[in-house]
Image (cartoon, grey):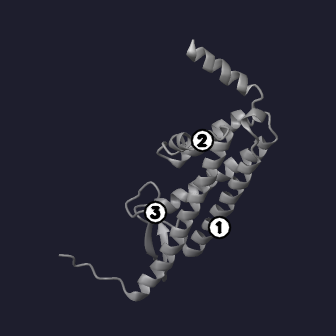
Amino acid sequence: MNTAKPESPFHQQVGAELYMRLGHAITQWAHVEDGLFKIFWKLQGEPEFRITSAIFHTPISDKVCIDMVNNVASILLKKSPLLEEWQKLHKRTSQRLKKRNKLAHRTAFHDPQDQSQSVLRPGLFDVVRTNMGVTKDTLNSKQIEEISKSFGRLAQDLQDFAEKIPSLEKLLPNSKALRSSSTSQRTN
């Protein structure tokens, strides 16, 4: 039998705002992932979409995906003026990933300093990020909204960057020769 008291309408409303902003932020992060995929796909010369998608979406963590895109970009853009722009985007993406992880791995609580507000904070039993449940490391609705906006800006910048990536033949002028020689080696 469930004996928990239902939350008051006031606390439900305060929590609803936090959850709405949190949902928006997580959705904005999905757009960041879309931008990373588009860069990954374009860097490979826009091959069969399903294969590239299967590769990109296989890693279990966003950090692995970001590192994978960075490794490919670092190789293929090595002699391109786009490398510097990519390195800045990669740094921003890695910094935003830390914020995304805070959103994804925290628990909603009423702010002990202001019961009219809800916040995200490390879990009560997270002794790594709290001092036996006590922490000042919280995120309120306004902070979550700002993080969401930063994800939206990053997603757009990733999409814009993807559009600048030249064809694989321009990035690797000898790539056709490499492909045809590897194909002929496989058939022999």
The residue under the point 41% across, 64% down is 133
For the point 41% across and 63% down, the residue is: 123
Query: Residue 49 in the image: x percent, y percent?
Result: 57, 44
Residue 27 appears in the figure: yes
Q: Disc 3 or 1, which lies upstream in sequence? A: 3
Residue 113 visible here = no
Q: Label 2 vs label 3: CA separation?
A: 24 Å
At horizontal 41% and vertical 58% (from top left) the residue drawn is 126
Nearer to the camera, 144 or 29: 29
Quadrant into which the C terminus falls? top right
Q: Is residue 173 left or right of residue 148?
A: right
Under tag 3, what secondary structure?
loop
Residue 26 on image: x %, y %: 53, 63
Other-residue count near label 2 (Cα within 10 Å), few / some / many at <14 / 14–19 / ≥20: few
Q: Earlier in the sequence, mark 1 or mark 2?
A: 2
Could you say which quadrant of the image residue 41 lies in?
top right
Camera-nearest residue between 182 and 65: 182
State the quadrant of the N terminus. Answer: bottom left
Per the image, the residue denoted by label 2 is: 67
Q: Secondary structure at mark 1?
A: helix
The numbered disc on residue 149 is 1
N-terminal-most mark, 2 or 3: 2
**Amino acid at the residue labelled 2:** Asp
* Residue type marked 3: Arg
Q: Which mark is residue 106?
A: 3
Helix, strand, or loop for circle 2? helix
Report the amino acid beneath label 1.
Lys
Q: Nearer the viewer, mark 2 or mark 3?
A: 2
Provide residue 115's location: percent of width, then percent of height.
46, 82
Q: Is residue 8 above or below residue 161?
A: below
